Image (cartoon, rainbow, N blue to C red):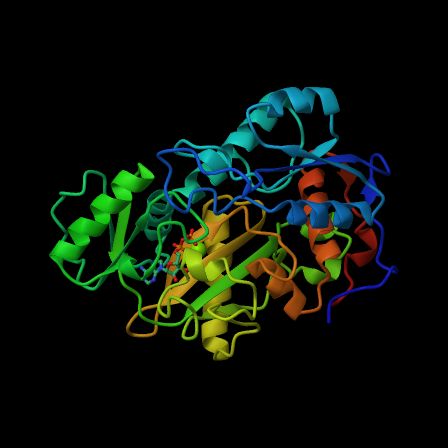
């Protein structure tokens, strides 16, 4: 168990307590959705309870917290509130790189924030671009093709059954069992549906029939210097969470981790079985963790991410996507379940994301490491 009591070494902040603003887009279930948006629009937005949990976690280390809705008034609210740092989980409001909007604004205003920066959040939302980068560096991805118009001729390496999903969404939006297409007719229908409904390209991939895993990563080469939990991090500075398997057999959509299955509570009927740590051969575990770290590094992701991986018909792992703003709802989000499985408290997870972020803005002094030099581990 990696959880610690209050004996953990303190880190050295330039100021003891900060004003931390949690920035997020909140689900509003009380109003009908605006016209012309997909049926599952805003599925990736957060519930206010998640913000409350984050704030309580941050406050356990003495910080003052506020919540600011990441909407069009955000620039004004930031100027008024003047937070020392923002804890960013905002999904953004639209366009081709919405997850990069808040980081871009914060960079412009020179306000420190947690997690990945603009370019990474923009690219990781785009599953096609992400896969091009990974493929270039020989990370295994399923054969894929992007359909922009929908009538493109299918490349010969793409063999049915295929899988069709929006190129730039998350949280299973646009994904249900009809995403699996078995012939040309279904392919054309589904691609047109995705392009028209989601107003973006459709990503067409080989259907991966095997087991599904997600692998969380925390840290950075110099994480030990700033973390309150230096023992979490391996020599390369990364912590690899135990692998979570999404066993979809009993879910509402038995083959895919769809929006419908993701929206069920853990343990609820129709939810997938969340198995953590997954029961996998050591060889496969090593590969999955290696790919998740490489996937994170190749996108220049910062401090935290979760990479989704599925096995192909020969049992080989293929990377689906990386989440650089992974959900942080306690007892529910995949990353939180992974942390829980190894005894990492929610509060400690959230605080480490804060301190790793803050350290990049000079808000935490590096830990004195001279004592550790020459000491064998
Ligand atoms: N090529 C594929 N073959 C089989 N299933 C897939 C494939 N791509 C996605 N899926 C299923 O759809 C789910 C959602 O896809 P993913 O790329 O992770 O998008 P997101 O989680 O951002 O909605 C995956 O968790 C997986 O169950
Ligand atoms: Mg996913």
User: Which residue sits at x=58%, y=40%?
Assistant: 26
Is residue 151 visible in the rendered structure shown here?
yes
Tell me the quarter of the picture where residue 341 sits: bottom right
In the visual, does 34 lie left or right of 335? left
User: Which residue sits at x=28%, y=72%?
Assistant: 313
User: Which residue sits at x=37%, y=70%?
Assistant: 254
Tell me the quarter of the image containing the N terminus.
bottom right
Tell me the quarter of the picture where residue 253 sits: bottom left
Q: Quadrant of ligand 2?
A: bottom left
Q: Position of residue 257 (x, y in %)?
A: 41, 62
Is residue 119 visible in the rendered structure shown here?
no
Tell me the quarter of the image containing the C terminus.
bottom right
73 vs 182: above or below: above
Count of numbered tags? 0
254 vs 95: above or below: below
Q: Position of residue 232 (x, y in %)?
A: 70, 61
């Amino acid at each position: 168990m990696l959880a610690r009591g209050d004996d953990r070494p303190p880190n050295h902040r330039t100021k003891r307590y900060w004003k931390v603003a949690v920035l997020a887009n909140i689900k509003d279930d009380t109003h009908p959705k605006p016209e012309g948006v997909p049926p599952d629009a805003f599925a990736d937005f957060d519930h206010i309870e998640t913000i409350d949990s984050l704030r309580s976690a941050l406050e356990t280390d003495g910080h003052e917290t506020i919540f600011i809705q990441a909407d069009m008034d955000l620039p004004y609210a930031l100027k008024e509130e003047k937070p020392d740092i923002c804890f960013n989980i905002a999904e953004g409001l639209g366009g081709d790189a919405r997850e990069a909007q808040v980081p871009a604004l914060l960079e412009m205003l020179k306000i420190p924030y947690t997690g990945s920066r603009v370019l990474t959040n923009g690219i990781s939302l785009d599953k096609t671009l992400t896969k091009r980068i990974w493929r270039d560096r020989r990370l295994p991805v399923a054969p894929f093709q992007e359909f922009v118009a929908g009538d493109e001729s299918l490349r010969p390496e793409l063999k049915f059954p295929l899988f069709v999903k929006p190129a730039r969404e998350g949280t299973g939006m646009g994904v249900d069992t009809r995403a699996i297409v078995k012939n040309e007719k279904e392919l054309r229908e589904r691609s047109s549906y995705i392009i028209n409904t989601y107003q973006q390209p459709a990503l067409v991939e080989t259907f991966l029939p095997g087991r599904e895993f997600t692998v969380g990563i925390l840290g950075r080469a110099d994480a030990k210097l700033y973390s309150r939990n230096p023992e979490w991090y391996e020599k390369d500075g990364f912590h690899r969470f135990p692998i979570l398997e999404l066993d979809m057999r009993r879910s509402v959509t038995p083959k895919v981790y769809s929006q419908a299955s993701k929206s069920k509570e853990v343990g609820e009927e129709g939810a997938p079985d969340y198995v953590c740590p997954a029961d996998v051969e050591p060889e496969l575990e090593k590969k999955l963790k290696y790919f998740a770290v490489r996937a994170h590094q190749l996108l220049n992701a910062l401090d935290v991410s979760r990479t989704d991986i599925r096995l192909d018909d020969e049992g080989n792992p293929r990377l689906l996507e990386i989440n650089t703003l992974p959900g942080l709802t306690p007892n529910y989000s995949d990353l939180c379940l992974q942390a829980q499985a190894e005894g990492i408290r929610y509060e400690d997870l959230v605080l480490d994301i804060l301190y790793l972020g803050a350290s990049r803005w000079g808000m935490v002094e590096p830990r004195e490491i001279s004592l550790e030099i020459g000491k064998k581990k």
